[in-house]
Image (spheres, rainbow, N blue to C red):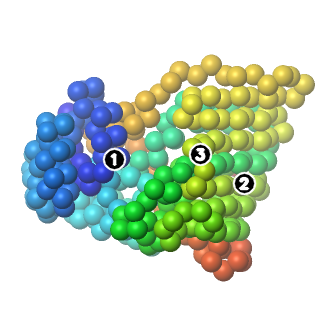
């Protein structure tokens, strides 16, 4: 049983803990840390954990095997490195880091310490994602041509100006860091590394100083193209569609829906078995920590997602297309040609 400490006790720490506590025989949240004493007390009462008053105390606790980092994005890189040096296994929420450089340093620290680094791209585990992956591997798409995706929700309309998510440093490009990274991960999982980005970002409706209407065009090493939208002032929307010479697939991973359209056939919905993606990713993390198969989101992929995010922000600010340097190893897709 992997003994984990939840770090940063906002709503997502609750989501992760609820997914495994009392349900998994592989991982249990046994401790927690937040700067706010009231958050620690609430979490302990709800989940039966112990609490530490500092992150350093968590890292010094020999009864804790791993950390689950649900902290502000800007803290991830340093906290990952600190955990690795302390001998802890690391699960960190997306985005992995806010810069490619800091992501490489954090990943290197885990590799040098021999610790597992898992980035919580939970939609990689969705049934729709895995069926599209299977179809790609089987050649059912023919030549993949284009992927379009959207991840939007209205939560920033209610942000308080003093909340950490309401800061541009934590939410560059509006919804890119909090939402767009989900779809960047899916698109690069399907089509391989991004080589060129052209993006725009505007603030039209949210009350805080964040962009709420962000979109980008991608080019991939495979030659395929892509489109991504993240809008933070509209109803919840999560989808990715993949187009090829042999088939088109239309996926709503959160709704567990996938429709496939093949030439000369009517579109047909694929029967999918629902997956609890949070339970699945945390148990796969625990398996990797126990010496099992590698966690499926490889560090190189997580770093590339950050590089794409950075390129989107840079392109939106400059108005120019950004070319990515993928010279460093980036094992970004089993499907890229």
Residue at 84% x, 39% y is: 245
Instruction: Tally the numbered discs.
Output: 3
Tell me the quarter of the picture where residue 176 sits. Answer: bottom right
Residue at 35% x, 47% y is: 12
Q: Is residue 164 left or right of residue 244?
A: left
Q: Residue furthest bottom?
A: 318
The quadrant in which the N terminus is found is: top left
Viewer can see residue 325: no
Tell me the quarter of the picture where residue 227 sits. Answer: bottom right
Q: Secondary structure at mark 1?
A: helix
Q: Secondary structure at mark 2?
A: strand
**Front in this rendered view, residue 158 or 277:** 158
> Nearer the N terminus, badge 1 or badge 3?
1
> Nearer the N terminus, badge 3 or badge 2?
2
Position of 85 relative to 115 (above/below)? below
| Alpha carbon distance from label 3 to label 2 | 22 Å
Q: Residues within 10 Å of mark 1 (few under 14, many from 20)?
A: few
Viewer can see residue 248: yes
> Nearer the N terminus, badge 1 or badge 2?
1
Residue 144 percent across, percent down from the top left: 76, 44
Position of 137 relative to 335 (above/below)? above
Q: Is residue 207 left or right of residue 26?
A: right
Residue beneath label 1, please? 11
Q: Residues within 10 Å of mark 2 (few under 14, many from 20)?
A: many
Residue beneath label 3, please? 235
Q: Residues within 10 Å of mark 3 (few under 14, many from 20)?
A: few
Residue beneath label 2, please? 226
């Amino acid at each position: 049983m992997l003994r984990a400490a939840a770090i940063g006790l906002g709503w997502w720490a609750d989501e992760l803990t609820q997914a495994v506590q009392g349900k998994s025989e592989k991982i249990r949240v046994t401790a927690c840390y937040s700067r706010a004493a009231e958050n620690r007390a609430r979490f302990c009462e709800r989940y039966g954990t112990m609490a530490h008053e500092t992150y350093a105390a968590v890292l010094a606790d020999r009864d804790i095997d791993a950390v689950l980092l649900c902290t502000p994005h800007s803290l991830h890189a340093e906290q990952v490195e600190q955990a690795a040096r302390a001998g802890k296994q690391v699960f960190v929420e997306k985005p992995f880091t806010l810069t490619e450089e800091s992501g490489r340093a954090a990943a290197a620290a885990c590799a040098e310490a021999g610790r597992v680094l898992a980035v919580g791209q939970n939609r990689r585990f969705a049934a729709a994602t895995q069926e599209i992956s299977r179809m790609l591997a089987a050649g059912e798409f023919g030549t993949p041509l284009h992927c379009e995706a959207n991840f939007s929700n209205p939560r920033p309309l209610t942000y308080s100006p003093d909340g950490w998510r309401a800061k541009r440093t934590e939410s560059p490009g509006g919804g890119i860091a909090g939402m767009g990274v989900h779809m960047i991960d899916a698109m690069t999982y399907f089509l391989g590394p991004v080589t060129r980005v052209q993006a725009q970002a505007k603030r039209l409706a949210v009350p805080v100083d964040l962009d709420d209407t962000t979109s980008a065009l991608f080019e991939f090493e495979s030659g395929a193209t892509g489109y991504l939208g993240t809008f933070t002032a509209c109803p919840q929307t999560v989808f990715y569609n993949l187009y090829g010479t042999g088939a088109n697939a239309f996926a709503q991973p959160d709704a567990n829906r996938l429709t496939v359209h093949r030439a000369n056939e009517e579109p047909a919905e694929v029967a999918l078995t629902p997956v609890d993606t949070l339970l699945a990713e945390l148990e796969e993390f625990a398996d990797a920590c126990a010496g099992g198969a590698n966690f499926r989101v490889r560090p190189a992929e997580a770093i590339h997602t950050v590089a794409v995010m950075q390129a989107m922000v840079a392109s939106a600010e400059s108005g120019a297309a950004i070319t990515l340097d993928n010279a460093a190893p980036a094992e970004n897709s089993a499907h890229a040609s």
